[in-house]
Image: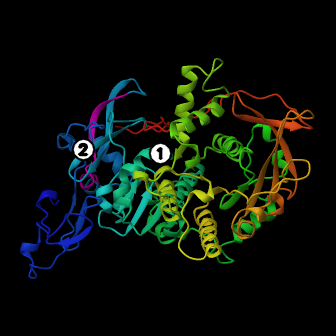
Amino acid sequence: MIVWDDIQIKGERKGEKKTLCPNCSHTRKKKTDPCLSVNFDKGVANCFNCGDFSVREEKNKSFDLPQQNFQDYTSISVKMSDWLKKRKISLKTVNELYVTEEMYFQPQLDKTVNNLVFNYFEGEKLINKKYRSGGKAFTQSKNAKTTFYNLNAIIGKKECYIVEGEMDVLAMHEAGYKNTISVPNGANDNDKYWKHSERYLKSIEKFIIATDNDEKGIKLREDIAHRLGRFRCSFIEWVNKDANGDLIAGIIHESIKSVKAFPVKGVVTMEDLKDDYLALYDQGIPQTIKPKDKSFTEFNKIFSLLTGQLTIVTGIPSHGKSTWLEWYVLNLIKDYSFKASFFSPEHSPMELHKSNFAQKVVGKSFFGTERMTKTEAIKASEFINNKLVMMSPEGGESPTWDWLLGSMQEQIFGNGTKIFVIDAFNKLLLPKGNRLEQINEVLTRLTAFSQSNDVLVFLVAHPTKMQLQDDGTYREPTLYDVSGSSDFRNQTHNGLCVHRTFKSENTDGYTTIRNLKTKFSFQGEIGASEDFAYNIKSGRYSRCVQGMAYPFDNTPLYGEEKKDSDNLFTTINETAPF
C-alpha cells in the first residue's frame, strides 16, 4: 500500500492528477512515466502499474476505532477451517481478505462465543469489526464508522460487484471476482454507510448488483439501483439464494455470466417488456400511489400517482398550496416508507418550517397554550430527521436549476430520496435565452429526471394574475393559467389546483383540490374535485362535504415509524460447528 504523504505532486494538491508512484516508479524502465492516478478531492490514489493504492485518512472524532491488533487473531482453528471449506472458501481467500477468528461477547446470545470476524478497512486503518457466531448472531464494534465491506478492493476500478453479505464477498473473491463489496447490514438499507463510502463509489462506471435471490434481496437490489442510477447498473439472479450458494453448487461463473441489465425508463426493447406485459394481463392495471389516511379516502378515487412522474400544483397565492401539499407528502412518506426533500425558500427560516412539519406530524400546535408536549416535539423531530431534508444553496447564492437538479441527484445517492417538492418554480433562476424556451427546457429536464430516477417530483407553480369575478371571488386557475407558458399543461404528467373558498355568512370555508390532469385514465378523473377542511391547530386537513368538515384525526404520524439503525442484525437459526 502507498503511504499518502509519500505522494509527490507538482502544483496544487486538488482535483485529479497523475504522478510517479513512490512504490514502483523507481524500478521501472520508464522511470518518469506518471503511473499513479490521484484524486485529491476524494482522497484516493491508484497505480495502474503495480496495483498499489492509497487512502487519505479522514480526521473524524465522531467514530471510535477498534484495537488495531487483528493480526493477533489470524490463526484459524480446524473447526473453522473445515466449516469454511464446506462453504468452498479457502484459507487463501480468508487470509487475503483479513478474515480472523476471535472469542467475543454476543449481546443477542448474552455470552462470549467464538466468532468469524470480518475486518473492515479503509486503507491500512481498521475501522470496524463485524462478529458472526456459529449460530449466525451478529454484532460489531461499538460506535464504529459504517461502510461497505471490502472497499479497498474497488479503488481505481471501473467496475464493482455489490453483494448482500460478507460471506458472499468471500465467495466472489474465491471465484476470482475480487472487485466485490458488501452492504454491512444485510438487506437493511441505511443512509450512513452510503455517505461514508461515497468517495469510493463515485468513480465507478458500472455496478453489478448481486444481492440475495429472495424478496428482501430483490427489494435491496432496487434500492441500490435507485441510489446509483439504473443506467449504470446491471444485476445477477442467483440460482440458489446467494453467491456463496452458487459457489457451493459449482455454478457461480454461469450465474455471473448471465448478468441482466436494468430496463432504463425511456429506452427499452419489446422483449424487455415481456414479463411486465404478461403480469399486466394477469394482474390488471398497476397499483397507484395514494395516501392511506382516511382524510384522502374520497380524493384517492379521483387522483393518484405513479413513480417517475412530474406533478404540477397550482393555485392562487394564499390558497394553501404549500400547506395541503405538505400534508399530502407527509402521508406518502409515512405510508410507503419514502423519504422526501423540500426546496421551499418562501418558508424561511428553516427551523420555523420544521415546526410546521412537526405540527402536522403530531396533530397539535407547536405554539400556544394547547401545544404539543416536549416529548411529542422530540418524537416529531426524529420522524422528520429520518424522513425529510430541506434544500438551500450555500453562502446566500442564488439558486439555479443546475444546482437544484444536481442536489436532487446527490440526495438519491446519499439518502435514497423518493419524493422531491419544488416550492415554487419562480424561486429559481432560469437559464439564459428566450423565456418560453427556458421554461420548456426546465420542464423537459424535470420530466426526464423524474422518469430516469423513478421518483415523484411536485412542482408548485403560481398562475398569472387572476381577474376578480362579479361576485368578488376568483375562478379556479388551470394549468394553462400558470405564469409563463402552456408547457406547464403540456409537459407535466399530472396537475392539481388548490382553491380556497373563504369563510362567509354562508360557509365556514373549505379548500377544493381539483384534478387538472392525470397521465393515465386509471390514475383518476380529470376535472373531478374533492373538498377539504383545514384545522389551524393541527395544520392537517379532513374531508369536507357541502361545507361540513369530518372529524379531524390527531393520531401522530410517527407511531409505527422505525428509524435507520447501524445495528439491524438478527439471529437466524443456522448452526455452524465453531
In percent of the image, x 34 and y 59: which residue is there?
200
Provide the secondary structure element on which disc 2 rests: loop
Quarter of the image where the C terminus is located: top left
The location of residue 87, given as percent across then percent down, is: 39, 52
Q: Which amino acid does the dot numbered 2 rest on?
A: Ile
Q: Which residues are magenta?
A: 94-106
Q: Amino acid at mark 1?
A: Asn
Q: Give the camera-side residue of 64 and 255.
A: 64
The answer to which image quadrant residue 450 occupies is: bottom right
Q: In the rendered view, does 188 fall on the left or right side of 144?
A: right
Residue 206, horizontal then vertical, whole percent: 43, 69
Q: State left or right for residue 131 relative to residue 505.
A: left
**Extreme residue toward the left, this view:** 26
Contact, mark 2 vs mark 1 (Cβ under 8 Å)? no
* Image quadrant in which you'd find residue 361: top right
Can you name the residue that lies furthest to the bottom here? Answer: 30
Residue 344 in view (yes/no): no
* Residue of label 2: 76
For discs 2 and 1, the disc positioned in front in the rendered view: 1
Residue holding disc 1 = 190
Q: Is residue 72 above or below residue 238?
A: above
Colour scheme employed for the rendering of this structure? rainbow
- Which residue: 42% across, 45% down? 192
